[in-house]
Image (spheres, rainbow, N blue to C red):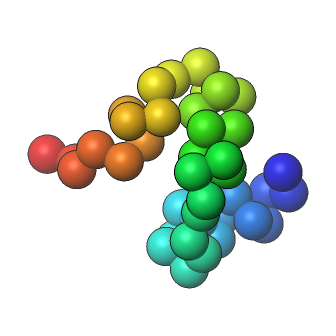
Amino acid sequence: MHRAYVGSIERAEQNVTLKTLAQLAGRLGVDPADLIKPIG
């Protein structure tokens, strides 16, 4: 996954599929649900 693509996800410029969300979570070693939890 290209770093520019990940950056656009972080800035909410890009929507992700569930497959991409699962890939990101796997690479980060976290549960996919942790990536979509509200902050705070």
Q: Is residue 24 visible?
A: no
Residue 24 locus on image (x, y percent): 65, 40
Please, is residue 13 above or below residue 34 in the view?
A: below
Residue found at the far top of this picture: 29
32 relative position to 1: left or right: left
Quadrant location of the C terminus? top left
Residue found at the far front of this picture: 18
Please, is residue 7 above or below residue 33 in the view?
A: below
Residue 16 locus on image (x, y percent): 59, 63
18 relative position to 32: left or right: right
Q: Residue at x 51, y 23 (%)?
A: 30
Residue 10 locus on image (x, y percent): 54, 62
Q: Nearer the viewer, residue 17 or 38?
A: 17
Residue found at the far bottom of this picture: 13
Place residue 37 in its image quadrant.
top left
Residue 1 locus on image (x, y percent): 84, 51
Q: Residue at x 49, y 73 (%)?
A: 12
Q: Residue at x 69, y 38 (%)?
A: 23
Residue found at the far right of this picture: 2
Q: Residue at x 43, y 42 (%)?
A: 35
Place residue 17 in its image quadrant.
bottom right
Place residue 13 in its image quadrant.
bottom right
Q: Nearer the viewer, residue 17 or 40?
A: 17
Q: Nearer the viewer, residue 26 or 10?
A: 26
18 relative position to 6: left or right: left
Q: Is residue 17 visible?
A: yes
